[in-house]
Amino acid sequence: IIFQESKEPSVLVANEIASLIRTKEAKNEVCVLGLATGSSPIGVYQELVRQHKEEGLSFLNVVTFNLDEYYPMERSNLQSYHYFMHDHLFNHVNILPENINIPDGTISTENLKAYCIDYENKIKALGGLDFQLLGIGRTGHIGFNEPGSHLNSRTRSITLDHITRVDAAPDFLGIDNVPRKAITMGIGTVMDAKRVVLLGWGNNKAGILQETIEGLISSEVPATYLQEHTNTTFILDEGASSEL
Ligand code: GLP
């Protein structure tokens, strides 16, 4: 779906999430949300915060799983996704701290594998992700599933692509400060979500979105796997859709 700009669609996506939360609440069920970082979802989080403050949207029945985190990464670091999520969403709504899951960038290397398996198991134990919000990186990554990621990949550590580190460099005040690794949910984890919405704003995403939506499905552009997901919507502005 193509919109002129990003404000209106961000509100529509927030409305879909809010309505899912309310439907689950009415049935006394937990709502399991897969969340993303980056600039793309910020408008959605702003609208969810507004609905919490002005319309009483409650997050008490919400459990969240974030897609990824740099590795290694301290939680208190301004560049951490832990910081980002609290700053943009969690600090402003009534979600219970124990219901927030973000890959832990401080886990020791020897415990990392077991930690990733546990992250997957926690999602499975809740019946899977009801809704997964996504952005896209210029390499075609979703989460931090860089080119080469397998369709059935699960939560794991990954080496970041050079382009991804270049794109992150301004936030880290130079590429040398950008971590070389990350923990990310897998493509398989995302593909198991019952509903997926990918947001793409601006001209600099036009090329990769053209490949993602119209190209051959390939591990070289991991987001192309979404072509086979039966309940995915790409929500783009005019700039991001300009090469379709
Ligand atoms: C990072 C995140 C991705 C995100 C991407 C795009 O690489 N790990 O999940 O989609 O950035 O970020 P932005 O939305 O700022 O373009």
Image (cartoon, grey):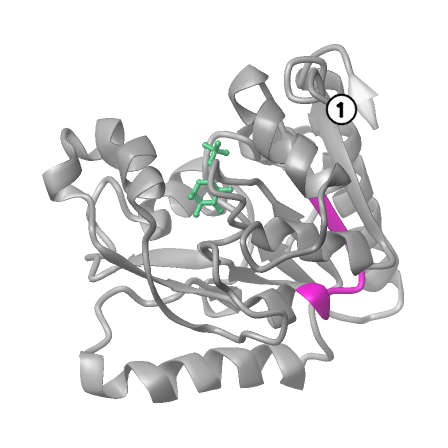
Residue 150, relative to residue 219: is it above or below? below
Image label count = 1
- Kindly identify the residue that appears in the image at 79 percent across and 36 percent down: 15
Q: Nearer the viewer, residue 109 or 131?
A: 109
- Residue 27 is left or right of residue 202, and the answer is right
Q: Residues within 10 Å of mark 1 (few under 14, many from 20)?
A: few
Spot the residue most to the left: 176
- Residue 172 is left or right of residue 200, and the answer is left
Picture coordinates of residue 18, whole percent (x, y): 77, 44
Residue 222, relative to residue 92: is it above or below? below
State which quarter of the image contains the C terminus.
Answer: top right
Q: Nearer the viewer, residue 231 or 107?
A: 231
- Residue 51 is left or right of residue 229, and the answer is left
- Kindly identify the residue that appears in the image at 68 percent across and 51 percent down: 224
Picture coordinates of residue 223, whole percent (x, y): 62, 50
Amino acid type, residue under disc 1 in the picture:
Leu
- Kindly identify the residue that appears in the image at 63 percent across and 69 percent down: 151
Spot the residue most to the front: 216
- Kindly identify the residue that appears in the image at 72 percent across and 49 percent down: 216
Q: Nearer the viewer, residue 215 or 129?
A: 215
Res. 191 image quadrant: bottom right
Res. 109 image quadrant: bottom left
Residue 132 appearing in the image: yes
Question: In the image, is the residue at mark 1 within 8 Å of ligand 1 by its beta carbon?
Answer: no
Picture coordinates of residue 122, whole percent (x, y): 56, 81
Residue 46 appearing in the image: no
Q: Is residue 230 magenta?
A: no
Residue 85, relative to residue 124: is it above or below? above
Residue 139, relative to residue 102: is it above or below? above
Q: Which residue is mark 1?
A: 244
Start-end of magenta stretch: 191-197
